[in-house]
Image (cartoon, rainbow, N blue to C red):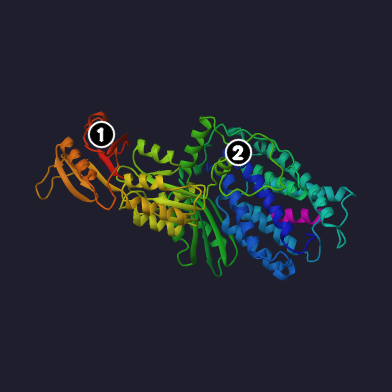
């Protein structure tokens, strides 16, 4: 641009991200193609955020550092690589290729100020690169929208004498005005292209929806126009969510949207496409000889990463459960809570980038704390799921034995709308898989030492969304140090020592078998043990009792089982394996 530093360029990217964030959920709710993975808005926002963070790194603390001091080639390569590594999902990967294509064209014209002619050439090159990255490009999608936006700018330049070439004497404001005018025309062309999408693509027409990625691209460019002008973005139509979320195509058979990066040497994208297509569909492999970004939909993410076992280092593994995404979307839309703000967006000038997703932005708008750190818990039981959800914790169904796979855990981490995540495994058997998932995730993940669901609840109460993951870790450790847990369950087999038979009640305090026999007497013994003072100011004040789905006694029968000043809190947990889960605090 006119300035020799990255400040104005960063402002344009920030404007794009702010506007996309304001309509992110609307974009998510549109998605039906090429698969029903409803997070297109999220994926495009993550790609832009990666670019913004890379620009901040390149600029450093010295805003006077010029583009030439940094190096134009370095800027292009760094930004393109950041976009690639930050991309998730089809839409994010395609957007990263659009960014790379535009950046390559811009850097190929040293000394030329950015004007309508250069913008048109950059966008045309971006569209060409994006088309070439897709094995079977489909018209009516983001690819078509990008191409037709570029065509509009090129046509305007060819037929309008009011697009003079800018020179060194051009004032920054005049340059911003000229670029904004060219991009606004492209936005209008993009909006027309988005509306025509259902005419070109049967999946969109059948779902009664426009392409989410194409719509997201018009939002991004409208945000750039707003940043250049310091005023409201150009008006864009809002689009209703899809009538269906499962168009009939082959991708509906796969569960995990899998993304990861590969770094090495002499890498060739085409070499890996065939083996990946044997494992799933919606395969994208893009990048260069040293860095690849891989995206596919599969039921076996571990086999997908194994394809690259001898090619290079695997990193930034991100696995999203598409079935969970669709279920969440359906539940939200059925409840009439689309999360879309239909009011005009606020001016781009002075706007701040949100730290989380639209839910975080909504909390901030209502005066709530900014969301910095999220949490996910492994859970079994409808009542327990509701309790964790009430505390703002995302849940993973661990089944009766609380035994999710590493990829179930990765998918749960992905669903949490923050980059810092506390993972509550809630079973000793899950901790190793949880730690592996934390290492694989590209988020900052803390695995909490919760070995039971009742301990996990105590930890969840201590968490705060506005604190850092380190601060939450300290609060969680303190909370767990003040909790003793117990449980009563039916024996799964006869005791080798002859103490109880299969089906008898067995009572535990922590991991020690304390009592057995009759359910009521066993529960009474566990409650009494938990109510005892531990000294040093650790007298229990409250014992929580969570009844399982097959508990032989109703909650009303538990009143009066504990004497003294200890209060009983009785709730229905709905867990399968245990009649009662208990926690003394």
Label placed on residue 550: 1
Instruction: State the extent of the magenta-drawn residues as a range.
Output: 116-127
Question: Hey, which quadrant is residue 81 in on the image?
Answer: bottom right
Which of the two residues, 474 or 313, is positioned nearer the viewer here?
Answer: 474
Residue pictured at 70% horizontal, 60% vertical? 103
Q: In this rendering, is residue 310 above or below 333?
A: below
Residue pictured at 67% horizontal, 56% vertical? 99
Q: Position of residue 564 (x, y in %)?
A: 23, 38
Residue 141 seen in the current view: no
Label placed on residue 26: 2
Main SS, magenta region, reads: helix
| Disc 2 from disc 1: Cα separation | 42 Å
In the image: residue 432, left or right of residue 36: left
Element on which disc 2 rests: helix
Q: Position of residue 569 (x, y in %)?
A: 31, 36
Number of numbered discs visible in the structure rendering = 2
For label 2, the crowd category at 10 Å Cα-Cα, with few meaning under 14, some 14 to 19 and many 20 or more, is many
Q: Position of residue 151 (x, y in %)?
A: 77, 48
Quadrant containing the N terminus is bottom right
Q: In this rendering, is residue 480 above or below 109?
A: above
Which of the two residues, 398 or 11, is positioned nearer the viewer here?
Answer: 11
In the image: residue 352, left or right of residue 416: right
For label 1, the crowd category at 10 Å Cα-Cα, with few meaning under 14, some 14 to 19 and many 20 or more, is some
Which of the two residues, 457 or 281, is positioned nearer the viewer here?
Answer: 457
Q: Would residue 464 be counted in the magenta stretch?
A: no
The residue lying furthest to the left in this view is 498
Q: Position of residue 38 (x, y in %)?
A: 54, 42
């Amino acid at each position: 641009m006119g300035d020799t530093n990255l400040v104005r360029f960063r402002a344009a990217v920030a404007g794009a991200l702010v506007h996309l964030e304001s309509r992110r959920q609307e974009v998510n709710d549109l998605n039906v193609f090429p698969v029903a993975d409803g997070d297109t808005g999220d994926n495009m926002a993550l790609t832009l955020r990666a670019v913004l963070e890379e620009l901040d790194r390149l600029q450093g603390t010295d805003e006077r550092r010029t583009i030439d001091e940094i190096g134009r080639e370095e800027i292009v390569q760094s930004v393109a690589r950041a976009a690639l590594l930050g991309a998730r999902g089809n839409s994010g990967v395609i957007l990263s290729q659009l960014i790379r294509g535009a950046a390559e064209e811009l850097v190929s014209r040293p000394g030329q100020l950015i004007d309508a002619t250069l913008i048109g050439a950059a966008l045309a090159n971006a569209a060409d690169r994006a088309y070439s990255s897709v094995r079977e490009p489909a018209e009516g999608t983001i690819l078509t929208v990008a191409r037709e936006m570029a065509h509009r700018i090129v046509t305007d330049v060819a037929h309008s004498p009011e697009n003079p070439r800018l020179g060194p004497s051009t004032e920054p404001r005049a340059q911003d005005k000229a670029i904004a005018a060219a991009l606004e025309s492209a936005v209008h062309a993009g909006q027309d292209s988005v509306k025509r999408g259902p005419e070109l693509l049967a999946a969109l027409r059948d779902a009664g929806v426009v392409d989410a990625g194409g719509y997201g691209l018009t939002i991004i460019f409208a945000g750039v126009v707003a940043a250049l002008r310091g005023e409201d973005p150009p008006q864009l139509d809002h689009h209703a969510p899809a009538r269906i979320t499962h168009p009939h195509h082959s991708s509906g058979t796969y569960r995990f949207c899998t993304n990861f990066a590969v770094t090495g040497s002499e890498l060739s994208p085409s070499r890996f496409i065939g083996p990946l297509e044997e494992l799933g569909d919606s395969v994208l492999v893009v990048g260069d000889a040293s860095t690849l970004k891989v995206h596919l939909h599969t039921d076996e993410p571990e086999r997908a990463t194994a394809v690259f076992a001898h090619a290079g280092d695997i990193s930034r593994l991100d696995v999203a459960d598409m079935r969970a995404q669709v279920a969440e979307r359906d539940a939200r839309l059925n409840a009439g809570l689309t999360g879309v703000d239909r009011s005009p967006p606020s001016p781009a000038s002075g706007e701040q980038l949100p730290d989380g997703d639209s839910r975080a932005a909504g909390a901030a708008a209502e005066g709530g704390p900014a969301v910095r750190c999220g949490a996910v818990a492994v859970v079994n039981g409808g009542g327990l799921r509701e309790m964790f959800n009430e505390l703002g914790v995302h849940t993973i169904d661990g089944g009766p034995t609380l035994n999710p796979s590493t990829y179930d855990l990765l998918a749960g981490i992905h669903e949490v709308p923050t980059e810092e995540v506390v993972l509550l495994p809630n079973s000793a058997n899950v901790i190793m898989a949880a730690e592996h998932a934390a290492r694989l995730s590209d988020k900052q993940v803390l695995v909490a030492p919760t070995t039971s669901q009742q301990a996990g609840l105590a930890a969840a109460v201590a968490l705060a969304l506005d604190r850092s993951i380190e601060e939450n870790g300290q609060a969680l450790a303190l909370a767990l140090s003040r909790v003793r847990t117990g449980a009563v369950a039916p024996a799964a087999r006869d005791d080798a020592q002859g103490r109880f038979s299969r089906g008898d009640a067995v009572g535990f305090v922590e991991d020690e078998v304390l009592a057995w026999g009759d359910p009521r007497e066993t529960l009474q013994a566990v409650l009494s043990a938990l109510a005892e003072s531990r000294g040093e100011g650790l007298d229990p004040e409250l014992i929580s009792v969570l009844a399982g789905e097959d508990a032989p006694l109703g909650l009303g029968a538990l009143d009066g089982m504990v004497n003294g000043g200890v209060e009983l809190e009785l709730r229905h947990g709905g867990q399968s394996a245990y009649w009662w889960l208990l926690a003394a605090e």
